[in-house]
Image (cartoon, helix red, strand yellow):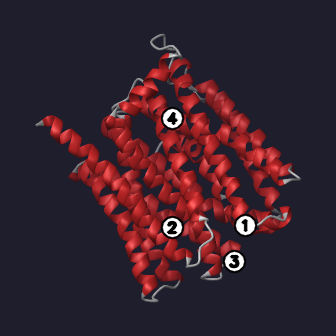
Amino acid sequence: MNLMIILLGCLSGLGVLSNNIILPSFESISKFFEIPTSQLSWMLNSFFITFAFIQLLIGPISDKYGRKYLLVAGLLIFAMGSFLCSISQSYNILIAGRIIQAIGAAIPFVLSKAIARDLYDGEALIKALSAIMIVTAAAPGFSPLLGAYIESISSWRGIFNTLTIISSLLFVFMLVSFKETKKFSKKNSLKDFKHIYIDLIKDKYFLLPSLSLAFLMGSLYALFVTSPLILEREFSLTHLELGLFFAKTVFIVFISGFLSPKIAHKIGMNKTIYLGFILTILGGVTLLVLYNFNLLNLIVYYVPISIFLFGFGLVNSVATAKLLHKFKETSATASSLLGFLQMIFSSFCVFVALLKIQYSYIVHLSILFIIINIFALLFFYWELKIINKKSI
């Protein structure tokens, strides 16, 4: 894994890092601003919604004018938003800081995939995206542990100070060392990209797999936001123990990201994606069965979560590579629209996952796993059915 892949993984994971690192501090933030836990969903949803819409602007601009200066601008904006969060004295100011963070984080998220598409092709692209996913997986895996540790030695403000420092260092490094991967293009004006977006939405070969990936990502964020509630309420974990749980699960994504190119090479991309979706659904079914038979403890809880995460890792890298392979000239625009759909649906899933319910959040999460990923599988199946009809 070369330095460029590591950097792209870090850039891609910046948005996830900024969300997951604050999960252990939900209770502290709730108490500081004297707000109910349910209102904390706005800390995530304000980020998701902003993140989603900003991506629609970033892709066309990047495909037209290049990657580098847009990338470093995003890192600077993210650092400014993180700093504002760190000094906020009201919940509204904190939300404003989160919105600025989202604007900054959306830029490297889109460009990391577009840069990979600039540099790699075919199986090399699958390997690159898988490697990026492995590096990116460290963000959701280790960030809650990092956040819990930072809060234990300072406060929730220290978490945002840490994000300010990380993004500032990335800004300086990329400004000095990163070389442009896509030159100015005369081919399309920015007005043309409105039509490119319309064409992409009309294109079933883009829309259906994008919806499939959007549903898949939504199920992952459902796991992220419900896990602190489950682990603290059902298993009485402390903040640090909660962080350790996430850190342990990240190795499952590491393994699936490492194996996905090999599996795709051996059995094909479509069968690999099918296998991944079967595993994500099986994870939800297993979790529900174990809970209904009163077999769950903390160790057993890892089993269905690991099944889900392994399936997620298989689908995410292979399906994304398959999708972007078809759109080389407008890879950032395609990545933007894909990211927009993923964030919009993730925002909806966060809202649903944090609804006040009368039954256990374990049951809630397992049902979400099953329903969401069945829909994701159906969208993927629909695409293949259209392709097969066309080839006859």
N-terminal-most mark, 3 or 1: 1
Would residue 106 appear left or right of 198 to someone viewing this image?
Answer: right
> Which residue is tagged 3?
238
Q: CA distance from mark 3 to mark 4?
A: 37 Å
What amino acid is at disc 2? Thr
Nearest the viewer among 305 and 339 is 339
Which label lies toward us, 3 or 1? Answer: 1
Q: Residue at x 47, y 49 (%)?
A: 133
Q: Residue 37: which numbered mark, if any?
A: 1
Q: Residue at x 53, y 29 (%)?
A: 59
Q: Are marks 1 and 2 in contact (CB under 8 Å)?
A: no
Q: Are marks 3 and 4 in contact (CB under 8 Å)?
A: no
N-terminal-most mark, 1 or 2: 1
Residue 126 in view here: no
> Which residue is tagged 2?
249
Q: CA distance from mark 1 to mark 2?
A: 25 Å
Would residue 183 appear left or right of 327 to someone viewing this image?
Answer: right
Q: Quadrant of the C terminus?
A: top left
Residue neighbourhood size for the residue with mark 4, other residues' Cα within 10 Å, grouped as few (<14), some (14–19), many (≥20): many
Q: CA distance from mark 2 to mark 4?
A: 28 Å
N-terminal-most mark, 4 or 1: 1
Instruction: Tell me the SS state at disc 1.
Output: helix
**Residue that extends furthest to the bottom in the rendered view of this protein:** 294
Instruction: Tell me the SS state at disc 2.
Output: helix
Q: Position of residue 305 (x, y in %)?
A: 46, 70
Would residue 89 appear left or right of 344 to someone viewing this image?
Answer: right
Q: CA distance from mark 2 to mark 3?
A: 17 Å
> Which residue is tagged 4?
336
